[in-house]
Amino acid sequence: ARCPSWASYVSTNNAEPNKLTQLPSATIAGQVAGDAAADPPHYGSMGDWSVDLGSGFDADCDLSASPTCATRGTHILSIPSTTYVSDLLSSNPRSLASLLRAGEVADVCAMLRDMIRGGVEQSGYAGQGGAASAAGGGAGADAGAQAQAQAVTSCANEDEDPTEANGCLAQCFHITPDVNYLHLHTTNTAMAMRDGPGNSGLGPDVNASDIARYPPRGAYNVCVCEPASWAAEGRGACPQAAPSDPEYVEQGLASLLGNFMAAAGVDGELGSFVCPAELLDET
């Protein structure tokens, strides 16, 4: 069966799937650049019910609001590409927690590394000091883009959304995804974010109505960067490097693994779990 909206979903020009980027262990959906000349015009970012990129929530480019189809921030999806993973924490044998318990450490590390890396790269952070290399326009433009990228931090406070007003980027999984396929949301300085009704926010968000489901505070996402106040549950790790720094991917992988394993209750079972050094060197 053909997906009727494939062009708007994976293409900016209605002709080729140029929103997709393939890394060794992950497929990345979304990019910074949109296309105002296409008919209809498209953002490069992926739409989401929770995110307003300048033309409304879950809306593609509207030339009256975004004449160049340049989004206010970005929203990128990262998906495992070498194996099927259903979700983070369930008893499904294909959940990420189940794969770790089964000893598939190298595969888990590789897919998470590429999911983090692809999300920040396609948000405009090259991991080499910021977005300057993608900005173009000479040394002055490069310096301005680099300064802007370096000013963006990780969303590190509870209920801090990855919005333009907060100046931060978040990389998070929903504990219970809306589709049965693991995907990492990378959301960066969006114009606005909708946190409800339901568990909709894409940062380190909580929902008091879900405390019984996600004890002890109703945190319904697991993120690369989490609030230090979550340390009592073994979570709350956050990379010290900014998303624009070359060290971010390695540090982000370590913090995401720690936060995820604590949420999954597998940290004690795996002891001093670390990713193989050769995987970290490939970032």
Image (cartoon, rainbow, N blue to C red):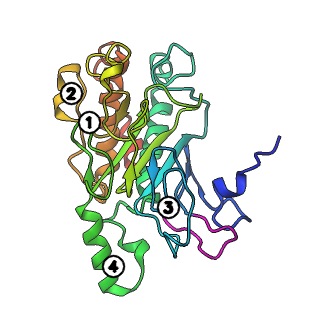
Main secondary structure along the magenta-highlighted residues = loop
Disc 2 marks which amino acid? Trp
- Examine the rendered structure and indicate whether residue 203 appears above or below residue 267: below
- Give the label on residue 230, or none: 2
Q: Give the number of the mark in front: 3 or 1.
A: 3
Q: Secondary structure at mark 1?
A: loop
| Mark 3 nearby-residue class (10 Å; few <14, some 14–19, many ≥20) | many
Residue extending farthest right: 1
Is residue 35 magenta-colored? yes
Residue at label 1? 226
The CA distance from mark 4 to mark 1 is 31 Å
Q: Nearer the viewer, mark 3 or mark 2?
A: 3
Residue matched to label 3: 55
- Percent x, y of residue 38: 67, 72
Cα distance in 3D space between marks 3 and 2: 34 Å
Q: Residue at coordinates 21% horizontally, 40% vertically from top-left? A: 157
Disc nearer the start of the sequence (2/4): 4
10 Å neighbourhood of mark 2: few (<14), some, or many (≥20)? some
Q: In the rendered structure, which disc, 4 or 1, sits on the residue that comes first in sequence? A: 4
Label for residue 142?
Answer: 4
Amino acid carrying label 3: it is: Ser
Q: Earlier in the sequence, mark 3 or mark 4?
A: 3
Secondary structure type for disc 4: helix
- 141 and 270: which one is in front? 141
**Nearer the viewer's eye, disc 4 or disc 1?**
1
Residue 202 or 191: which is nearer the viewer?
Answer: 191
The part of the image, by quadrant, that contains residue 211 is top left
Name the spot of residue 250 as percent of width and height, x first: 32, 45
Q: Position of residue 70 (x, y in %)?
A: 48, 69
Q: Which residues are magenta?
A: 32-42
Q: How far is disc 3 from disc 1 in space, using C-alphas?
A: 29 Å
